[in-house]
Amino acid sequence: MRVIVMVEGDGVDEDKATPTEEMFQKMTAYNEELVKAGIMLDGEGLLPTAKGARIEFRGGTTSVVDGPFVESKEIVMGYWIWEVSSLEEAIEWAKRCPADPGGEGRSLLEIRPIATPEDFGAEYTDEIRAREEQLAEQLKQRES
């Protein structure tokens, strides 16, 4: 099963979070363990919300809100994509994460299974499946 592991932090403290060399050292060592174990497929840190935007769809209208998102209690700061045998395995790996190596502030990891076509039932028709497979092939060709 594939899962996304989202690294979340306090939105109100976003501008106070400054990476340290120690943090990079610990996270790089952790990422090396994940890669050696064969479960890490991808992962990236995200820039602050001040450099982003939110698009909201409500009642037939679309609005854009520029960052920062100070009203957010929790924001996604980064993510990993892991291939694991179970949610329990992902939890065990997540518990080893040096998410707050400095011991200050608060971090949260959220683990969510990535949906597969089988999760959607009859609404995911053969036609839609074929179109999605074609898109996936186009993406693979772009990467090479």
Image (cartoon, rainbow, N blue to C red):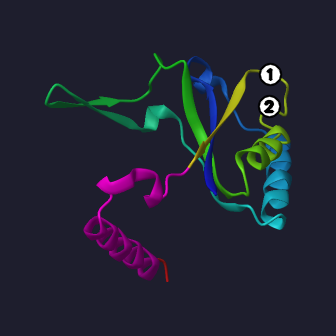
Q: Report x, y in % for residue 110.
A: 64, 35
Q: Report x, y in % for residue 25.
A: 85, 49
Amino acid type, label 1:
Glu
In which quadrant of the rendered view does residue 136 lie? Answer: bottom left
In which quadrant of the rendered view does residue 99 lie? Answer: top right
Q: How crowded is mark 2: few (under 14 residues within 10 Å), some or many (20 or more)?
A: some
Q: Mark 1 points at which residue?
A: 104
Q: In this view, does 64 lie to the left or right of 32?
A: left
Q: Is residue 41 left or right of residue 11?
A: right
Q: Give the range drawn in magenta.
A: 114-142
Amino acid type, label 2:
Asp
The number of callouts visible is 2
Q: Mark 2 points at which residue?
A: 100
Q: Report x, y in % for residue 95.
A: 82, 38
Q: Is residue 127 magenta?
A: yes
Query: CB atoms at circles 1 and 2 under 8 Å apart?
Result: yes
Q: Distance between the residues labelled 1 and 2?
A: 7 Å
| Quarter of the N terminus within the rendering | bottom right
